[in-house]
Structures are given as C-alpha cells and as structure tokens.
Image (tube, helix red, strand yellow):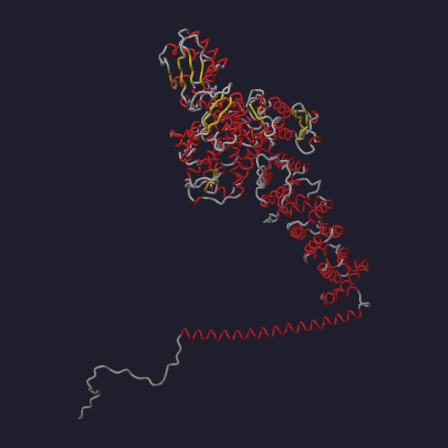
Amino acid sequence: MAFKMDYSFEGNTKSRPEQNLSGASKKLSRDVLLQKTQEERRKRQEQRLKLQSTELLQSHIRSYLVRKHVKGFQRHEYELLQNSMKVDEKIRKLLFFYEQRQDFSKLCKLSEELLVHEYEVVQAMSSNSQLSWAMKKFLVLCLKHLSESPIFIENINVFSDDSGIIFYLIKKGYFTYFRSLLDSTSQNSLMKIMTLIQRPFKFLNEYGPSQNLVLAEFCNNFLKPTLSYNVKFYLIPYLKEKQDTSYYDKLIRYLNSIYYLVQSSSLFYCILALEPFDYEPSYDSIHVISLLSKELHRIKPHLDLTEDSDYDDEEEGLSEEEVLISDYLKILNNSSKVKKWLNFLENNSEDDMILTAFVNFAQNLLLVYKDSIRKYLLLYKLGLNSVFLRKLWSTLLKKRPNDLQINGASLVSWKDCHTKLSVFCDMFTFYTETLTDKENSDTSETFTQNDLHAMSALLKKVAIDLIEIAFPMCRASSIMVTPEINHLYRGCLNCIKMLYTLDMRKQFCPPGFWTERKIHISQDLAKKNYLSKISCPFGGSTLNVEDEDHLPPLSTIEQRSLAILQELPFLVPFNTRVHLLRDLCHYSLGENEHQRMHSDFRLHEKVVVIRRNYLYEDAFEKISTINDMKARLRIVFINSVGLEEAGIDGGGIFKEFINEVLKTAFDPNRGFFLMTGDNALYPNPNVHLIVENFSEHYNFIGRLVGKAVFENILVDLPLAEFFLAKLLVERTSACYLKSLDPVLYRNLLYLRDYMGDVGDLGLDFTTVSNDLGETKVMELKPNGRNISVTNENRLEYIQRLADLKLNSQLRKQCAAFREGLNSVVPILWLKLFNHKELQVIIGGDTQEIDLNDLRAHTTYSGDFTPEHPTILLFWKILYEFTDMQKRQLLKFVTSCSRPPLLGFKELNPMFCIQSSGVDNRMPTASTCLNLLKIPVISDEEVLRSKLLSAIEQQAGFELS
C-alpha cells in the first residue's frame, strides 16, 4: 500500500497568508451607515417642506389674487352704486376693500355723509347689531387717521357715545391715538380732544369689569410716559376740574390693586395733580403715593443744599430735573393737601398700616434733599408733631429685640422697623432743634427723661453697629449700599449727636454713660495725619480733603476709630481727645518741628514788628499776609516812645502778644463783636455798616484764635455758646437762641405755649431790626407781612425767626472766621469736641482751680525756695482765697483766669515765683514768662493786702 504525503518540505517553517482576489469589501461600518441614513431622511424631509411651502405660497397668491379681484369688483360696484346704497351697506363694503392709497377720499366722503345723517345712523345702531358692529370697525379706521382730518374726530365724537363702542375702541388703541394727537395739536384746538379723552370715564360705573381696562390704558398712555406740555398744563387740569371724587377713587383703587406698580415719576405727579379739591385721603391713596414717591430721589439724586443755604432761595437756570423737582415741591406743599393728610393721620393714629404708609412716604421725601424737612411742608409738620413722634417711638419699642439688631443681613432685607427708625431719627433731630424745652424745667414736653435715656442707649448701640457694618472686616461681609442705607447711617449718627447735646442740657443719662465703652485710638491716626481725611462709609476707604502724601490704607479697626472720632467723638474721653489734638498739631509741623530744635532756625523766623499803641492795626496789616501761620513768629514790640523793647522772644512775648491782640480784636468798642446779656462775645450782625472789608478782619481774627489753639496758648475769651456751636456746624438750631437773646427766647417760649388764639397777638412773619438807629422791617418768608401767625403756623414762625437771628444775619461773619480758623487748625480736628469743650480748648477749664496741682508744678527763683517763710505764707493765703480771687491771681500771672486743660504741668514756661527784694514793693508779674514777683514779706496781712491790691488792679510788669 502506497503512503501519500500531504505536505511539502521546502525548508520554510512559516505559513504564507491567503490572498483574496475578489476586490474591496462593500460592507459599511455602523456609524457611516447611520450617517448616510440620516442624510437621506433629511433630504426627504426637505423635499416635503419645499412642496408644502410651494403649495402654501400658491394658496396665498391665489387668495391674494381672488381678494384683489373681489375688492376691485366691490370697489367698482361701490363707485357705481354708492348713491343708491344704504349707509350700512356702504360701511361694510368700504371696510372690506379699504386701502388708504386708493380709498382715503371715499373714507372722508362717507364720514361726511354719516355726519349728515347722524340722527338716523344713531337710531339704526341701537336696533341693528350688524350696523353697530360695522360702526365699531369704521371708527377704528377713523382713529388711525385722527391727525389727517378733523372729520374723523367729529365721527368719533358723534358715534362713540356708547359703552360697547368706547370699550371696543379702547382695546384697539383709543388712548394711544389720542395721546399722539394731543401732543401734536395747538393749544387752540385742545378742548374737543380733551373731551373725547375724558369720555370713557363716564361709563366706568356701568361696566365694572371694564374699569381696569380703561384705567390701565389711560395710565399707560397719559400718566406713565414723560409728560408733554399739553398733558401737563392742559389735560391734567381739565380732568381735575371735570372729574368727581368717585373717578379719582377708582383710579387709586386700581393702582393699589396692581401687583407690581411701576414707579414712574410722571405717574406720581399726575396722581397728585389729579386729586380733586374735595377728595378725602384714604389708606389706598396714601399707600399708592408712598409707593410712587420712591422714584422721586432718582430723578436727580441728592439735590443737596449746603447747610448754610437759605431754604427760601430760588436758583436761576434750573435744569430739567430741577424743574420737575420744583413742580413736585409746589404740589406737595399745597397747604390744603398737607392739612388733609395730617388730619387723616391724626384720626387713624392707631392704625399701624396707615402709620407705615406715612413713614414710607416720609422716607422717600427725605431722600431727595439733604435738608428735605425744611423743603417739604408735610415733613416740616410731621417733624413738629409730637403725637406722630411719640407714636413712632412707641411702635419701635414694641418691636422684638432681634428686630432692632442692625447687621448686614437685616439691612439688605430692610426690615420695616429700620425704615421707621430712620424716619424717627430725622424727625426727632429736627424736633429737638426747635424750642422744645420748658422754661425752668429739665424735661421734654414729649419724651420723659427715661424715654430719652432709653433712646440714647438704643441709638448709641445702633450707631456703633452701623459703623462696624460700614467698615467691614472683610470684603465678603460688605453689603451693597443703597440711598436708604446711607440715609439710615447719616440720620442715626445725627440723632445720637443731637441726643448728646440734649443730655448736656437736661442730664438724663448717668455720669460716664457716653464713654463707658472703651474705644481704641491708634497713634498712627495723629502721627500720619489721618484725621485730615474724611471717612467714607460703605466704601472701604477714605477720601482726602486736600492733597496729602500717599499714605498706606487704614486697617478696618483704624477706619472704625476714625469714623467714631469724626462722627461720635463724645464716646472717647475728653482727655484722650485733647492729647490727640496736641499730637495732631505737633505732627502737622513735619520738618518744621525739627527745624525748631536747631539754633539756626531763628534765621528763618518771621519777625513781626508791632507798635504797642497800634496793636491790632499792625497785627492785621503784617500778619494777614503770612500764609503759613503754623510757622514760628517772633514778635518785636515798639513802645510808646518809638523804641524797641528789650527782651528775647522765647515764646513768652508771643504769648503776651496773642493775648493782647485778641483782647483788642474782641473788644466790643471796636465793633467786630458784641456782648450778650451774660457777657459772652459773638459777631456783630451789623458790622457791614462799620467796616467795609469786615470778612478780611474776621478771617484774620479766626487765624489768631487758631494760632493760639495750635500753640496751646489759653486766651481769656468768653465766647457765646451759639457762636462756638457755629464754628463746628454752619447752621445752629433754635435751642441756642437762649445764649444770644434770653428775652426773645422767653417770648418765643411764651408764644409756643400760648393757650389762646395766637391770631389775637397780631403777629405776622416779619421782624424789626435796628441798624445803628435805623429801624427796618424784615420778612421771614416771601410776602411775610401779609401772613398772620396762627396756632397752626406758630412753630414755623419760631423756627424762621430763630434761624434769622442765629444763622442768616451772621452767615458771612462766621464763614470768614471759620475759614481763618480752619487754615491753622482744621475744623475736622476741632469737631473732636462739642461747643462747651471748644471753649475749654480756647480758654481753659472753668472748674475750680486745683491749688495742689499748681503748687506741685511751681518753680522758685531768687531767694525763694519751697520752704521759705514768705512762700509758706503765700500758699497759706492762696488756699484761703475765694475762687474768684484765685482766678484773678492766675490771670494776673498767666493772662488767663482758667487753668490749663490737662493741669498745670502743661503751663509753659512753668509757674514761677521770684523774690523782688524788700517788702515796700508791690507784687508784679511777667505774663510772658508766667512769672510772679513778690517782695520778701513776713507779715501775713501785709502780704495778703498787697496780693489782693495787685490782682484786683491787674497791675503788671510796669509797676516792678
């Protein structure tokens, strides 16, 4: 059997791949197949759409051609048979084929024909519903051509006096077309147009569901858009005269029912202007007004008045926004309207919803001006309304403690109580600025001392919380500032400052209340002159007042400290603030302070030669031209015989000079200053009749006072309280009138509390001034001589009279004095103190002289030592002196009757007693050196007698 081998043996161990010679495979991948299928499907869909579009286009073209043919046929038939057709048929045919380009003349002719047969047409419309419907469509056509021919206006006038037709026309733009026509029509042709605009309102009572349609369209076309001249000055007065209160009440209820009421300034004006004379306020009306008034401050944000500007001044060349604001002022200040609002509030004082509406309204008005209370009569009256203030405060007290917590989250959510708190702060501040004190009483007629204490505690905490929010620790905790938040911040700080001022008079807070919270003050605030910057709340930075060196940014703690020092300085102890002022003056010298320490600095001193007989005149002439009053001045006196006085000015001569020249400047006989009944000094209101360039003199005197403060030289100047207050704030309140004219103050208190009819007193809004013997009558407000003072306006009379006496008459004098003072010691620094503390800064402490402190800081020269018998007698006698005698001695030696602010350690040079030889001499003094010279006397009575004789006669250096 043969064996067959099925393999070959060629020596190749690898198998060869098989070769496929049938060509490339036609099998597609899955993705390619899906894509191909999708593309085919898209093409089929596109083909179907093209077919459908073609069919639709063909149908439209066929329809158009058919309609064109039918309209042409109908138009031709109308032209041939119009004389034989009935009116209703003419209307239907014209409506069917009407095209403006071809058929406008036919429309005009048919309109004329309808007017000729108006009686028959109106009668037919009442029984023929088809004609009535056709007339609706025809009148819509007339609306579209209102401005092209008066005939269309007449057609609408004749045929639209029907509720069904008028409501249909309103849906088709009735008010829109008439607004356009009204704006483009001359004033002589407005009456019929305004009559037709008013027509829809006569049907409001018949069809309740259509009321909102009419009112919505009317508001959208006439009240909300920008007011044109014809709308503002013709349509609004016309509607106010023709409409009764029911229509206005429907408009108010409609606006109150809208979920989201668009805050339009035009709508707000119209709602106020449309109010009928006999309309009585309601919650709805007050609520709507409060909502709409939110737009008011956005017209032109913060048309700020400077604090010293008169609120009766009128600006010339007002901008468009200011004219609009002025219009609001006139309409909001309508006395009849304001009286109704106040009566409504008084009659519903227990209704929290009404109170809230008034508070919101007041808040919106307060945001418009810096001094809104004096601009808006409603705010003015509310600010003087003790019942309103009391109710508002009671409402705040009823809130839960958490509601009065001020933090970033609560400010953003803007809780209701924060709005009330903001309004209360502004109103209470204004109320307190008026004459609210009872004569010989320490309680307010509206709030008890417990109320005032509770108010102070609450607002002090809120104020500090607001400062912490205004200057957050990190950017993440900062909030978006709004006008409302800014207003709360400013109003709360002003109110707590007013409470502090009130507490100085009434003392309703316990001792240490204001400084019980320790406030950390960084030394860098003074060293780097940060106090010359203005804190910028909610901005996280500060703004320079003048060009300053580039300083590193303040930390949050420093920003808060700066804000407290500038806004609430009374929270920091007085001595701390005095040290801060000293540091500010010291560091403000910069390089000059180092130059003062060098011996060659005298080469750069400004030498001023002063004749003793012409002290003020020479000082005014030579020092007024010196720009930098912080630099050192060296005074050289020329005596009465023309010789230069011996001596080196080491500071004592300048001290004597500053005291003497200020004594001369403030001398009432010179005419720049007058004295009040309690011998306090204030600027002369009639100085312009004495000195022509009086502003330059007040500026110079202010610079001298600033120089004395800067150099820590006390000057014995008893300044009037109101004048000191005006150095810190430009406008002082009526409560300071007592320090100017106590008699007038008591008379105004009597007028305020008068129980009878004030009109019987025969007062008007004028006052009499006596200018150097010439009597003049001054009006307190425009046309004041014809306005009688009544029970209703007596508080306004008091406020205006006090403002005239305290502010208007002294504005230029005080402004010049402030400018001079500010050029040496910035007012921002002096605002660390209140007006009473400022008197201490200028003239020293009024408290009893501490002899132990004086004795501890006294030096001796000549034969004297602390144990010398004459010195022991001197101190024994001094301890037995009365307070007046001690002050006389202090003035005799230092030229000032008051001790230094921080004790006698501040006296420079130190208080020194020097022996002057035998006992037949009188005691003398060198005020420039704070040096007392007394003879060596061993007899107590002799020494006492000579001391009293010297200090009572104020004998000085010339007797030694």
Question: Closest to the observer: 683 or 758?
Answer: 683
Classify 574 as above or below 540.
above
Classify 333 as above or below 42.
above
- Residue 512 in sight: no
Question: Closest to the observer: 44 or 642?
Answer: 642
Query: In the picture provided, is 76 more to the left or to the right than 3?
Result: right
Q: Position of residue 943 (x, y in %)?
A: 43, 9
Question: Closest to the observer: 656 or 391?
Answer: 656
| Displayed quadrant of residue 68 | bottom right
Seen as rendered, the residue at the extreme bottom is 1
Q: Position of residue 921 (x, y in %)?
A: 44, 9
Classify 162 as above or below 804.
below
Q: What residue sits 39% from the left and 7% below the top?
A: 938
Classify 597 as above or below 925.
below
| Displayed quadrant of residue 300 | top right
Q: Position of residue 866 (x, y in %)?
A: 36, 14
